[in-house]
Image (tube, rainbow, N blue to C red):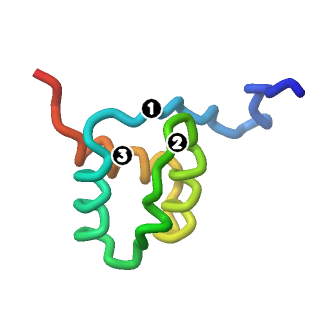
Amino acid sequence: MQHSKETVKGEKKQESFKMTGDWKNLSKQMKAKYDQLTDSDLKFETGKENDLLKRIESRLHKSREEVVSIIRKLQPVKA
C-alpha cells in the first residue's frame, strides 16, 4: 500500500510533526490547561503522532495547526 502526500487543491499540506521533550510532562500541562482532555486522548505512542493530534483536535474542536501550535508552545526551548 502506498501512502500519498499529495493534497487536495486549495488544501494546505499538513506540516510534519514529531514529538520532542517529555510527553508525560507535556500531557500533564495539556490536561491542566484543557480539562476536557482525558488520559486516553493524550496517550502517545512513538510513530503515531497523527493519531494523537487527531484525538486532541476532535476533543478541543481545533485545527491540526492550532493543536501543533499549542504543543510547541508547551515544549521546552532547546538552548
- Name the spot of residue 11 as percent of width and height, x first: 69, 39
The residue tagged 3 is 69
What residue type is disc 3 on?
Ser
What residue type is disc 2 on?
Glu
Looking at this view, is 39 or 30 the one in front? 39
Element class at badge 1: loop
How far, Cα to Cα, is label 3 from label 1?
Answer: 12 Å
Q: Is residue 41 above or below residue 48?
A: below
The residue tagged 1 is 18
Q: Is residue 75 above or below residue 66?
A: above
**Whether label 3 touches label 1, CB < 8 Å:** no
What residue type is disc 1 on?
Lys
**Whether label 2 touches label 1, CB < 8 Å:** yes
Judge depth for marks 3 and 2 and give the one in front. Answer: 2
The residue tagged 2 is 49
How far, Cα to Cα, is label 3 from label 2?
Answer: 14 Å
How far, Cα to Cα, is label 2 from label 1?
Answer: 7 Å
* Quarter placement of the N terminus: top right
Residue shown at the point (80%, 26%) measured from the top left: 4
- Name the spot of residue 16 as percent of width and height, x first: 53, 30
Query: Which of pointers 3 and 1 lies earlier in the amino acid sequence?
Result: 1
Residue shown at the point (46%, 69%) measured from the top left: 60
